[in-house]
Image: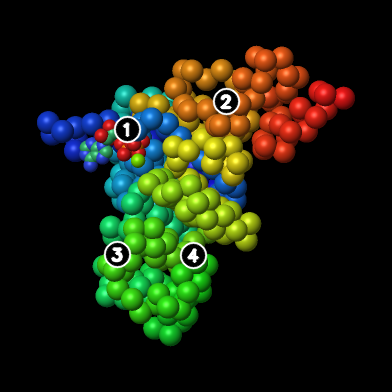
């Protein structure tokens, strides 16, 4: 299920002293079946971008299409009329209009069913008195019976590694990491086609982060598309098929992790994965390492072994 951004601008608090243009002319297609990473400095617009995918924020200009449904700044017909009337319409506006006309008006519920989003620090958004009620909230909201919703909640909780003993506890007596798992289960329980994760491993210890990533990998392997915002370049290298780099509200690069880290990308001032830091040192020390096909520690070991023969 593809997601497409067409000429999207987004401004926070327009016409106020706090006005801030967070996204500028975003054009992007994500096919929705893969594992995509979004990286970039704090403030580059990553969270803003992903929140537009499920209609939480509306574009100030432009359109975001989820499958056949299109999210625009106002009612679709009205927006189309406004674009048609625009005497000074640029090519950009004309292309946008044509795009919107091929799509249908979005329905928030339908979008939310397709796209599940786990916010940054989701553990602060729990509110029910028991873990199972919190997780069942989503499915209930989508019209499942109490029993079905509870059943989905239990399955989702098991998936995130929280067994029966957690079901009836209060979310507020759990650790931060456990609460985050509850919040993630709440989204998984709604069985979205695409799962968006905004810095899901931030603040977790390395083992907790690894367990979390293994969970997302298994969800992905069962057919859910993943879009993940992260600061962790080791995660990008290990898990993502493609990486989108943002800078100051724009998309400045899109490639595979290997291409991105293999090249000199000082422009983007991104961290380099540990594996590449090691490999670059080894190349300087004279080892014959082909950095353009380096994905794992195993690859590095093989390249070293081959060089020794
Ligand atoms: N509610 C808001 N009001 C005004 N400005 C905001 C708001 N939320 C975010 N911003 C600003 O928009 C920019 C992009 O923010 P964000 O998308 O959260 O970046 P990132 O997730 O890449 O760190 C930042 O400069 C941020 O300060
Ligand atoms: Mg953010």
For disc 3, the marked residue is: 126
> What is the CA distance from the residue labelled 4 to the residue labelled 2?
32 Å
Task: Identify the residue at image location x=83%, y=24%.
Answer: 308
Task: Identify the residue at image location x=52%, y=28%.
Answer: 272
Task: Identify the residue at image location x=73%, y=22%.
Answer: 289
Q: Position of residue 140 (x, y in %)?
A: 38, 76
Q: Residues within 10 Å of mark 1 (few under 14, many from 20)?
A: few
Q: Position of residue 257 (x, y in %)?
A: 59, 33
Earlier-in-chain disc, 4 versus 1: 1
Query: CB of mark 1 within 8 Å of CB of mark 3?
Result: no
Q: Secondary structure at mark 1?
A: loop
Q: Is mark 4 within 8 Å of ligand 2?
A: no
For disc 1, the marked residue is: 43
> What is the CA distance from the residue labelled 1 to the residue labelled 3?
25 Å
Q: Residues within 10 Å of mark 3 (few under 14, many from 20)?
A: some
Earlier-in-chain disc, 1 versus 3: 1
Frontmost residue, 54 versus 137: 137
Task: Identify the residue at image location x=56%, y=17%.
Answer: 264
- Figure quarter occupied by ligand 1: top left
Frontmost residue, 17 versus 275: 275
Q: Secondary structure at mark 3?
A: loop
> What is the CA distance from the residue labelled 4 to the residue labelled 1?
30 Å
For disc 4, the marked residue is: 160
Q: Quadrant of the C terminus?
A: top right
Q: Is mark 1 within 8 Å of ligand 1?
A: yes
In the drawing, what numbered circle is on residue 202? none
| 288 is higher (above) or lower (below) than 4 | above
For disc 2, the marked residue is: 277
* The quarter of the displayed image where residue 177 is located: bottom left
> What is the CA distance from the residue labelled 1 to the residue labelled 2?
26 Å
């Amino acid at each position: 299920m593809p997601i497409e951004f067409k000429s999207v601008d987004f401004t926070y608090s327009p016409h106020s002293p706090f006005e801030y243009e967070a996204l500028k002319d975003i054009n992007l297609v994500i096919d929705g079946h893969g594992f995509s990473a979004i990286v970039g400095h704090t403030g580059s617009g990553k969270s803003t971008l992903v929140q537009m995918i499920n209609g939480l924020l509306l574009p100030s200009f432009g359109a975001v299409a989820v499958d056949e449904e299109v999210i625009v700044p106002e009612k679709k017909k009205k927006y189309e009329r406004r674009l048609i009337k625009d005497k000074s319409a640029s090519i950009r506006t004309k292309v946008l209009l044509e795009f919107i006309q091929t799509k249908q008006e979005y329905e928030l519920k339908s979008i939310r069913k397709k796209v599940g989003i786990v916010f940054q620090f989701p553990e602060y958004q729990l509110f029910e008195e028991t873990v199972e009620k919190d997780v069942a909230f989503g499915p209930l909201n989508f019209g499942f019976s109490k029993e079905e919703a509870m059943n989905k909640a239990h399955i989702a909780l098991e998936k995130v590694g929280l067994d029966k003993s957690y079901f009836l506890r209060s979310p507020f007596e759990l650790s931060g990491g456990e609460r985050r798992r509850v919040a993630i289960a709440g989204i998984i329980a709604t069985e979205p086609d695409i799962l968006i994760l905004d810095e899901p491993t931030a603040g977790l210890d390395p083992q907790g982060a690894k367990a979390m990533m293994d969970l997302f990998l298994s969800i992905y392997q069962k057919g859910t598309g993943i879009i993940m915002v992260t600061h962790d370049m080791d995660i990008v290298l290990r898990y993502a098929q493609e990486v989108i780099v943002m800078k100051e509200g724009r998309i400045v690069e899109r490639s595979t992790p290997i291409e991105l880290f293999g090249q000199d990308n000082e422009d983007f001032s991104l961290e380099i994965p540990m594996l590449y830091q090691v490999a670059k040192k080894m190349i300087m020390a004279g080892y014959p390492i082909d950095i353009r096909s380096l994905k794992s520690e195993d690859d590095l070991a093989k390249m070293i072994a081959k060089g020794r023969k």
